[in-house]
Image: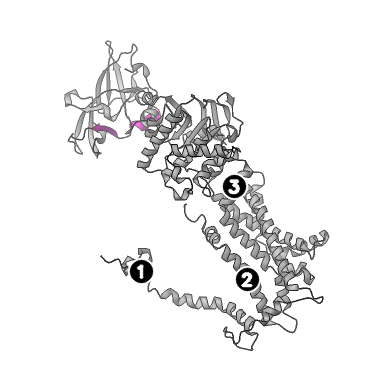
Amino acid sequence: MSGKKTGTDRNPSQQGSGPSWLPHLFLVPFSVATLYPVLYVVKLALSGNDGASASPIPTSISMDAFATVVGNTDSHGNWLFGQQLLNSLVIAGLTTVVGIVLACTAAYGFARFEFPGRRVGLLGFLATQMFPGILTMIPLYVLMQKLGLLDSIAGLTLVYATTSIPFCTWTLKGYFDTLPRELEESAYIDGASRLTIFTRIILPLSAPAIAVTALFSFMSAWNEFVLAYTFLSSEQAFTLPVQIRNYVGDKDVQWSLFAASSLLVSLPVMALFYALEKHLVGGLTAGGVKG
Amino acid sequence: MASVTLAGINKRFDDVHVVHDLDLAVDDGELVVLVGPSGCGKSTTLRMVAGLEGITSGELRIGDRVVNDLSPRDRDIAMVFQSYALYPHMTVYENMAFGLRIRKMAASEIDSRVQEAAKLLGLSDLLQRRPKALSGGQRQRVAMGRAVVREPAVFLFDEPLSNLDAKLRVAMRLEVARLHKRLGATIMYVTHDQVEAMTLADRIAVMSLGVLQQCASPDEVYRRPTNTFVATFIGSPAMNLFPVTSTTAADGQVTMVGRGIQMTWTSGAEQAMPGELTVGVRPQDLQVVAESDADLHLRVDVLEPLGAETFVYGALEGGADGATGQRDAATQERCASPFIVRLPPDQSVRSGDLLHLKLALPHFFDTQGERLSQFDD
């Protein structure tokens, strides 16, 4: 008997859905439509704005735009790009750490304990997600001004962490709900305290969910523009998205610098995605099937 | 090791009374199996002993200490769960050592205990594996090992074999029995499987609807069930029950009449049998005889040939229609179950045949389903 697979060896659930090239007929145009803007930005970064051409293929390759963006300095000769990159990293990193620490503990409390206000608290968290973030800008501005936190990394971190905690809490609570209670009961009988159970059982088992939530938190803070543009005023305190906006002038747009800095800003997020890919897949599919 | 004493234990979840006035004493080194159908309160009872559920009222003692308000970690107990509850991110060794590390035991002592338990349970080659790389039986052995290394005063097993396939369950049952024999440990073991209960227990505690029905040795529970619930729950297939009306003659001979039943019984007891009662007989205590010698007549419906024996299901037929007295609803329901007879495999029977049966070792219950023990042989 031949070991070669024939058409009839296919899984029955995969049969009878028409010719195999049919899905590609739809997928290829969709992929092109999705990739076109990205390729066009790459082209702009490498070739500059060469006129009316709509082609995404670079007409020339030059790294000048990248060099200009990276080498950007202020009037005193301070290296602005480095400072702004550091600002973005610190703000996004601190937002992630503060948000995850608070969201993990809050989510565990909501998932495992019954207490007065639990339901109201959860619904309150959900309600904050239903309003556009821009609504909070004025009260936040007033609050930051009174606290003297305008134009500071600490202030922006606090704002970002506050806005990311409700979503992170809901996501993590959903995951904690799926963890079998017997694991905690077993550890409890073994002699572990609540804190030990949380740090040595719950958190390691929740690594995929924490990775997804942390990435969300990091990306939100990293890419955020409106709040940063409102609360930061000095170039030294800017984050990278605010600096990107500076390449769009009132009368002139430096497209190649805009495109180059956009690509540079997206690199750390891409690196993070790559590093957390394994956890992300686990986190996104967690609870989908019985383990 | 230590004894466990439950005195007047009650458990309520809001308006639902789950365990009623439970009195149970587990002696030092004894293996008591709590058995009963789903929702009977057996797991809740075990969780109360573990400290995972609060006690509404009553007193729980482990050894000499009242432990009602002690947290699980202070009760000196170990528990094996149905779902194994192994920590997936730890190796077998780390799983077994977890409880000892939490208690800050010396590393050398931890290693010695883990190695010893691993040897006892045949886990020595699996110590560096993660739970996901183990079979169901191996996982349950690790769960048992995790309990063993702790050397607790009391072991609690909550349906530990229910997730295993039939063959593995038999093997693991032996493992538990061996463990109990070697360690001489005090064990409370919850199961809904009466075979597990019969084979493992020093004593069986049968529960139904949150009430302890009977607590006795497996032999006693099987031979002298205290009521119709225990009679039908213990033993497979279940005991047959049928309602009869009895008349006791001056010489002590009792005549019993019911649907498909006409039998006499010589009672050794001094008092007369009640006029209305329920008779129970196990499927193996019935014998096919000639029509003139028969107590019962059974119309065969379904046959279950199992190789070594054949179970015959049917309904009693013919005879006088007695037994009109009221019985408790549960007993009435049990009486309505199909009648079962165990026959040797060479007995030729077909569906539709009328079998004439002679009854031995009958059990007598009153109209409330309670055993009439004064009429035991």
Q: Residue tagged by mark 2? A: A267
Q: Tell me the distance, in whole angstroms, between the alpha carbons under discs 2 and 1.
A: 42 Å
Please name the residue shown 52% across and 37% down the image. Answer: B112
Q: Tell me the distance, in whole angstroms, between the alpha carbons under discs 2 and 3.
A: 33 Å
Tell me residue B245's x, y (percent).
31, 22
Q: Earlier in the sequence, mark 2 or mark 1?
A: 1
Q: Secondary structure at mark 3?
A: helix
Task: Say which of B57 and B77 sits in front.
Answer: B77
- Residue B332 falls within the magenta-colored stretch: yes
Task: Say which of B17 and B27 sits in front.
Answer: B27
Q: Tell me the distance, in whole angstroms, between the alpha carbons under discs 1 and 3.
A: 49 Å
Rendered image: mark on residue A16: 1
Would you say A74 lies left or right of B105 here? Answer: right
Q: Earlier in the sequence, mark 2 or mark 3?
A: 3
Tell me residue A145's x, y (percent).
82, 62
Q: Residue tagged by mark 3? A: A200
Tell me residue A240's x, y (percent).
71, 71
Q: Which residues are drawn in magenta?
A: B328-344
Chain holding disc 2: A
Would you say A211 lies left or right of B228 here? Answer: right
